[in-house]
Image (cartoon, rainbow, N blue to C red):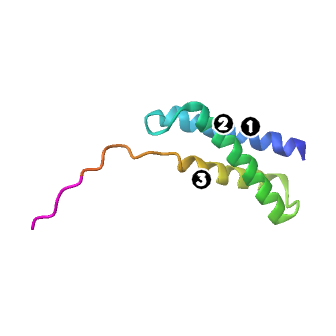
Amino acid sequence: MLLEALSSAILGLALAWAYAVRLPHRLPARPLVLSTGIAGALFGAFVTRSALDAGGFLLSLIGAAVVSAASLSLLLRPAGRLRRRSAPA
């Protein structure tokens, strides 16, 4: 169980680091991104483990990756400014 939690945290950290390197202009501060990735992975592993009742190590890591990626995607900001044009009357 400890190995599973550690593996999930490392997976979340790696995923968050990849997001931070690839999209630095669309994300907030790097410590927030890294901690969100880790927390999302740990929560995903917990939910997967609870739902599948010790369904397996690999399934738990897949659940950790999915929830971590979903939580990191919530931090993304739009790439450019939204241009709003008024409708002609």
Decide which of 10, 42 is in the foreground and name it.
Answer: 42
Q: What is the secondary structure assignment of the residue under circle 2?
A: helix
Could you tell whether 84 is left or right of 26 in the image?
Answer: left
Structural distance between the alpha carbons of marks 2 and 1: 6 Å
Residue at left 50%, top 35%? Answer: 22
Label number found at residue 10: 1
Residue at left 72%, top 51%? Answer: 64
Look at the image and give the residue range highlighted in magenta.
84-89
Reading the image, the residue beneath label 3 is: 70
Q: Which mark's residue is nearer the viewer, 3 or 2?
A: 3
Structural distance between the alpha carbons of marks 3 and 2: 14 Å
**Mark 3 vs 2: CB contact within 8 A:** no
Quarter of the figure with residue 49 = bottom right
Amino acid carrying mark 1 in the image: Ile
Decide which of 78, 3 is in the foreground and name it.
Answer: 78
Q: How many marks?
A: 3
Q: Position of residue 51 (x, y in %)?
A: 80, 65
| Few, some or many residues within 10 Å of mark 1 (<14, 14–19, 20+) | some
**Mark 2 vs 1: CB contact within 8 A:** yes
Tell me, yes or no, whether the highlighted magenta stretch contains residue 85: yes
- Which quadrant: the C terminus? bottom left
Q: Is residue 60 above or below residue 31?
A: below
| Few, some or many residues within 10 Å of mark 2 (<14, 14–19, 20+) | some
Q: Is residue 26 above or below residue 49?
A: above
Q: Is residue 33 above or below residue 74?
A: above
Could you tell whether 55 is left or right of 20 in the image?
Answer: right
Could you tell whether 14 is left or right of 28 in the image?
Answer: right
Q: Earlier in the sequence, mark 3 or mark 2?
A: 2
